[in-house]
Amino acid sequence: MRKKLVAGNWKMNGGLASNRELLCALAPVAGVDVAVCVPYPYLAQASEALDGIALGVQDVSEFTAGPYTGEVSAAMVAEFGCGYAIVGHSERRALFREDEAQIGRKAEAALAHGVVPIVCIGETLAEREAGEVVPVVERQLAPVLEVLGREGLAKAVLAYEPVWAIGTGRSATVAQVAETHGAIRAWLANHGVAAERVKILYGGSVKADNARELFALDDVDGGLIGGASLVADEFLAICRAAAVVQSCIQ
Ligand code: 13P
């Protein structure tokens, strides 16, 4: 059985003083995995402050080392005990023009250093309105499978984050999430990936009051949380919602 994972994505937020408060207020939640993905400069601070909560980053270089100004390698983040690296977040795809193959190589670089990639996929509003949700996520997954191979992809975490639900307060509905997660898992199985092993998180306006119904879906293995991960009580409430659902399926 897959254990639920709730990962916070702080995005480009935080500061030493506010992080201290937030990190101190976090505590592990029994029965579920919890992670926080912090900006690089705060890795050392977070790694020292966290106990029983995994550490992650929001991106990682596809390169190993060398003349790549501004890049941060998987080996470097692994030195700080980093367990997860988000790759291919829609903000990076849209603002930094990351493409599928590059996202696959970033995931590969992470895996090579024992860092689990959280590979983000998801459609824009225009793509949803055009009825293209499943083809879009399949188009995003195929190049990642090509780079990672079946074994590699089975070690990754996927995060379905519809772009229109991110930071808007408008989460996808339970029916929309169920349909897309089901399609993603079916695609994995059809491509020879050990689909039952792969965690598929949902992200996009997850809050304490909608987490439980989303996490209760069969193919939803937790959440990738943006804004709500910056508020300790809200984030912990989301983690507890995951724990309640997990205890019901045990
Ligand atoms: P929000 O939870 O703020 O909608 O952000 C979701 C997200 O982008 C997580 O990666």
Image: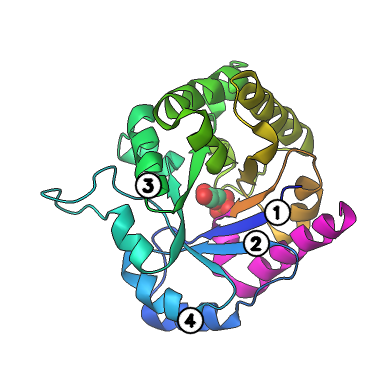
Badge 2, how many Cα within 10 Å: few under 14, some, many 20+?
some
Crowding at dot 1, Cα within 10 Å, few <14 / some 14-19 / many 20+, comes out as many
- Give the alpha-carbon distance from disc 3 to disc 4, as whole Å: 26 Å
Amino acid of disc 2: Asp
At x 72% / y 31%, what residue is drawn? Answer: 176
What kind of residue is marked 4? Answer: Ala
Q: Quadrant of residue 232?
A: bottom right
> Which residue is under mark 4?
49
Amino acid at dot 1: Lys
Q: Secondary structure at mark 2?
A: strand
Indicate which disc, 3 or 2, sits on the residue closer to the N terminus: 2
Tell me the distance, in whole angstroms, between the alpha carbons under discs 3 and 1.
24 Å
Task: Tell me how far mark 1 sits from mark 2, CA to CA.
Answer: 6 Å
Residue lying furthest right in this view? 248
Mark 1 or mark 3, which is nearer the start of the sequence? Answer: 1
Q: Residue at x 14, y 52 (%)?
A: 69
C-alpha distance separating marks 3 and 2: 22 Å
Give the residue at mark 1: 4
Residue 24 seen in the figure: yes
Label 2 near label 1: C-beta < 8 Å? yes
Question: Mark 2 near mark 4, Cβ–Cβ under 8 Å?
Answer: no
Q: Is mark 4 within 8 Å of ligand 1?
A: no
Name the front one of labels 3 and 4.
Answer: 3
How far is disc 4 from disc 1 in space, using C-alphas?
23 Å
Mark 1 or 2, nearer chain start: 1
Residue 250 point in image, percent of width and height = 86, 54
The residue where tag 2 is placed is 33
State the residue position of label 3.
112
Q: Nearer the viewer's eye, disc 3 or disc 1?
A: 3
- Frontmost of labels 3 and 2 is 3
